[in-house]
Amino acid sequence: MIHYSNYIDGAFVDGANGEKITVTNPATGEEISTIPETQLDQVEAAIAAAERAQPAWAALPAVARAKHLHELADKLREKVDPLARVITEEQGKTLPLARVEVNFTADYIDYMAEWGRRIEGDVIESDRPKENIFLFHKPIGVVAGILPWNFPFFLIARKLAPALICGNAIVLKPSEETPNNAFEFCKILSETDIPAGIVNLVSGYGASVGRALTESPKVGMISFTGSVETGSRIMAAAAENITRVNLELGGKAPAIVTANADLDLAATAIQASRVINSGQVCNCAERIYVQRSVAAEFTEKLVEKMKAARFGNPLEDETLDYGPMINQAGYEKIVRLLESSVSDGAKVLCGGQRGEGEGGYYFEPTVVAECTQEMDIVKEEIFGPVVPIVVFDEIDDAIAMANDTEYGLTSSVFSNDINEAMNLVEALNFGETYINREHFEAMQGYHAGWRKSGIGGADGKHGLHEFLQTQVVYLQRS
């Protein structure tokens, strides 16, 4: 069983007191690695290394920083298959999806590197004669990136690439559920010419290592992806130093299927959103609102497609649609929500049981009909291969129910009437809306939620600016 070491100031160093966290394969329950349970002094050492290295990095022309990122992306592409196997083993996603994640990570790093020549300021008109007003974008300094377990490899890039191209240094903390891929990433990074201290990685629990990062006065921004509860704690911990936060939190995305929809397309797209990564994706369709006149036909099509989804150990069969849940807690949450909905009158049309698989946290693809807006399964994030369906009569009813949530990350509309679709888009209060397609964002877009789904966002020009701060200069000429 492999043991990983923290990556601090360009070197791999073990935890100071030797305490370890064991990582398991969710498909089998097998122990696959140990990682350091990092102590406070090493967290502080990682932050200090980033703080020392950052000024020289920021002094480089952005195009020079971009060359380093391109080199890193190229090296990642040389290791797609071994990296994908590491991700699948510790996280449970299918191997084809893990390969997509690695390639997308490399593409994302290249994409952000290309902003090196595109970071622009402004010249602002002055009220005074012979005065120029300039607005400059400057790096923040040290960024802390706290990573989730569902797309752990890609989220390294989503935090690291914009931070570095903007001239920041970063300290990463992977999820204790899926840390191995991050350590393998640092092994590859150590083979590049990126200066020591610009990227650091420390492992451990959020309550200790994560808290130390968020409470540090030397950290200028905390970028976190995860649950609302943890995001709220991060905000509270960051408040003492007024540290900037960038938070992507939970989602409860509605998908509205109207009488004018292509029902085959809608069923296909929604099934894809519920089984990808075992349904453990914050932006996937989490609750379906279908118009009564087409509800029976749509539900039949969706049940057929969900029943066809195949699951199991993704390292044994590359053709599977999905693998296990990440852990027992994820499995138990699905069971609780299903039992609650059935006791409140919902009907399970397919699935609803733990799937076969020795030692793994598997759950059958499940469709739940006759749901109502008040049920927990419609209000709480499921994060599993389960689809609750609510029937509506009038479009205004669908809008009201879709917006009735504490979340506001993504949403979708299925309708072949362009006026109807765009009227729905205008009425929906979500950071993203997809029309007649599955839920999956583009790197050049802007992935940002409303309400409790987060603060700030990621991707594209607007996501890049999250890692910059402004300085305005007033130049009075004689």
Image: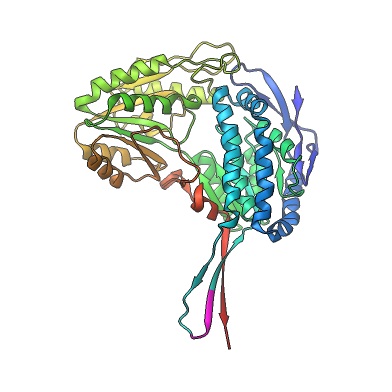
Q: Image quarter for residue 303?
A: top left
Q: Quadrant of the N terminus?
A: top right
Q: Position of residue 145 (x, y in %)?
A: 62, 45
| Image coordinates for residue 130, horizontal then vertical, percent | 52, 85
| Residue at image coords 53%, 44% | 231
From what the image shows, is residue 114 above or below residue 397? below
In terms of depth relative to the viewer, which is nearer, 398 or 156? Answer: 156
Majority secondary structure of magenta residues: strand
Q: Name the side, left or right, on which 343 lies relative to 182.
A: left
Q: Is residue 351 left or right of residue 141?
A: left
Any part of residue 71 in sight: yes
Q: Residue at x 60, y 42 (%)?
A: 157
**What residue is rendered at 22% in x and 40% in y?**
396
Q: Was residue 102 drawn as part of the magenta stretch in this picture?
A: no
**Which of 200 and 419 lies nearest the eye of the viewer?**
419
Q: Is residue 39 left or right of 425 when viewed as pictured?
A: right
- What are the residue bounds of the magenta stretch? 129-133
Residue drawn at x 61%, y 40% is 156
Question: Is 48 in front, or is 93?
Answer: 93
Residue 358: percent from left, percent from top: 58, 11
Q: Is residue 148 visible?
A: no
